[in-house]
């Protein structure tokens, strides 16, 4: 006997069939047959009920025309039932046609799976309109099961993916804003991106790809990851360390004293933006020790500096975007290690910068000069501004922190070179 017919046959004697197979005592039998048909298995051999009730034994007796065993399990041969149905004229098409006539069409499991996969593909369709920089993320979430875990069904995935795409296309937010405000403007309401919601989880995953924010965990890490795309918990917790920037009386006072200044995001978005120094160049470093040493050594004579302190905060990105839009030339240095180059690459996604002693040649010279430099650890990363730097890092295999080349950096700052 072949696979299940798509529709009930018209030559089935439904009244007699109801008396034979429609007995409640044979419901288990019909269900077993349908399961076999759904799997595409032939209707041969036997089906067995391990602990039948008396009503089920009597129903089997009426179907087969003889009494089955009076104790133990109840077995019914499918070939026998098929022959009975054909010979009696109840179902000339046999058992498969009878089951379809009695309980409706049987959908093969393979067809069900195909329809479900097609529904998932349709749910993922909005990912196709994302920018190229999110193409890798879009491809990854199609295969890693994140959306399926969050949404459970294709029907629930459709609005989830659509909302995530809508949010990601509006990022990074410039100027930075609170998550609630962003959600109210772009999504279903102010709480759409609340912590723990499926949409927040999916959007945060996309943000990490968009901004290059590194792996991590915990509440602070999540706040910083959101902030990397300009979405903030508030406008005071995001700060940036600077030296000798001007533009407001307070900044001018600190610059005249040659003292470092911590700016909040609020001060950058709610007040007059700072202006670039007279030389039109802003030096960017990764570690506070460099900026502190510059303040100690050069004081008010030091050119404007910004310290990003690891992954750039929303305040740092806001400041640097403003500087760049006003024509400032941004020069960037960082640790010579895989983490440092990832930070620099992430920064380049938000603002254009040129390397400040941050090339393969500078690294090779430092790696040779520094005694006892620690081994390089972590996964390699690309260095788009100087592809040879990634090659040099892999070959030399040592980490050179900014503090190890501090004298060279201070010399540049003191002479205004680079």
Image (cartoon, helix red, strand yellow):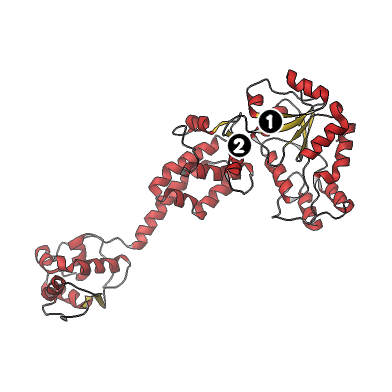
- Residue drawn where x is 80% and y is 47% of the image: 401
Give the quarter of the figure containing the C terminus. Answer: top right
Check disc 1 and report its element: helix, strand or loop. helix
**Residue 115 image point, x, y percent:** 37, 55
Q: Position of residue 324 (x, y in %)?
A: 72, 29
Bin the neighbour count of mark 2 within 10 Å (Cα to Cα): few under 14, some 14-19, many 20 and up: many
Q: Which mark is residue 227?
A: 2
Residue found 18% across the figure and 80% down from its top: 71
Residue drawn at (10%, 78%), measured in percent from left and top? 65
Q: Which residue is mark 1?
A: 321
Q: CA distance from mark 2 to mark 1?
A: 15 Å
User: Reading the chain from its start, which is encountered first: label 2 or label 1?
Assistant: 2
- Using the image, determine if residue 176 lies above or below residue 8: above
Residue 193 falls left or right of residue 67:
right
Q: Is residue 339 left or right of residue 74?
A: right
Q: Residue 389 at what x, y percent from top left?
A: 78, 49
Q: Comparing marks 2 and 1, which lies closer to the viewer?
A: 2
Q: Residues within 10 Å of mark 1 (few under 14, many from 20)?
A: some
- Quadrant that contains the N terminus: bottom left
Describe the element under mark 2 as helix, strand or loop. helix
Residue furthest out toward the top:
249
In the displayed structure image, the side of residue 27 where residue 152 appears, left or right:
right
- How far across and down, in percent of the image, does residue 218 sit? 58, 46
Reply above or below: 206 against 186. Answer: below
Marker count (numbered) = 2
Q: Between residue 35 and residue 44, name the one nearer to us.
A: 35
Numbered badge on residue 373:
none
**Residue 157 visible from this viewpoint:** yes
Query: Foreground: 313 or 128?
Result: 313
Q: Residue at x 88, y 41 (%)?
A: 408
């Amino acid at each position: 006997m072949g696979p299940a017919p798509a529709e009930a046959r018209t030559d089935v004697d439904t009244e007699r069939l109801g008396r034979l197979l429609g007995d409640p005592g044979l419901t288990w039998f019909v269900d077993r047959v349908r399961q076999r048909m759904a799997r595409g298995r032939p209707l041969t051999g036997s089906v067995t009920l391990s602990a039948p009730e008396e009503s089920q034994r009597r129903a089997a007796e009426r179907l087969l025309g003889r009494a089955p065993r009076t104790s133990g399990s109840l077995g019914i041969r499918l070939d026998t039932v098929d022959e009975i149905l054909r010979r009696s004229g109840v179902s000339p098409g046999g058992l498969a046609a009878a089951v379809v006539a009695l309980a409706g069409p049987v959908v093969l499991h393979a067809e069900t799976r195909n329809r479900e996969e097609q529904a998932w593909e349709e749910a993922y369709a909005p990912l196709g309109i994302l920018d190229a920089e999110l193409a890798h993320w879009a491809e990854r979430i199609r295969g890693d099961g994140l959306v399926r875990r969050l949404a459970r069904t294709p029907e629930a995935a459709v609005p989830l993916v659509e909302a995530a795409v809508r949010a990601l296309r509006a990022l990074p937010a410039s100027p930075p804003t609170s998550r609630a405000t962003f959600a109210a403007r772009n999504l279903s309401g102010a709480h759409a991106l609340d912590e723990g919601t499926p949409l927040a989880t999916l959007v945060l995953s996309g943000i990490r790809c968009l901004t290059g924010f590194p792996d991590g965990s915990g509440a602070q890490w999540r706040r910083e990851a959101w902030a990397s795309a300009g979405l903030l918990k508030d406008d005071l917790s995001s700060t940036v360390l600077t030296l000798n920037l001007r533009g407001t009386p307070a900044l001018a006072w600190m610059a005249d004293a040659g003292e470092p200044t911590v700016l909040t995001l609020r001060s950058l978005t709610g007040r007059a933006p700072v202006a670039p120094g007279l030389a039109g160049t802003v030096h960017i470093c990764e570690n506070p020790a460099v900026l502190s040493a510059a303040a100690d050594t050069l004081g008010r004579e030091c050119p404007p500096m910004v310290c990003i302190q690891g992954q750039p905060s929303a305040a740092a990105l806001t400041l640097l975007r403003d500087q760049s839009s006003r024509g400032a030339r941004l020069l960037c240095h960082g640790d010579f290690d895989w983490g440092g180059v990832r930070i620099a690459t992430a920064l380049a996604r938000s603002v254009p910068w040129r390397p400040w002693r941050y090339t393969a040649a500078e690294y090779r010279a430092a790696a040779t000069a520094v005694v006892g430099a620690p081994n390089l650890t972590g996964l390699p990363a690309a260095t788009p501004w100087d592809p040879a730097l990634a090659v040099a890092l892999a070959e030399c295999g040592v980490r050179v922190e900014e503090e190890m080349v501090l004298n060279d950096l201070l010399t540049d700052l003191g002479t205004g070179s680079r």
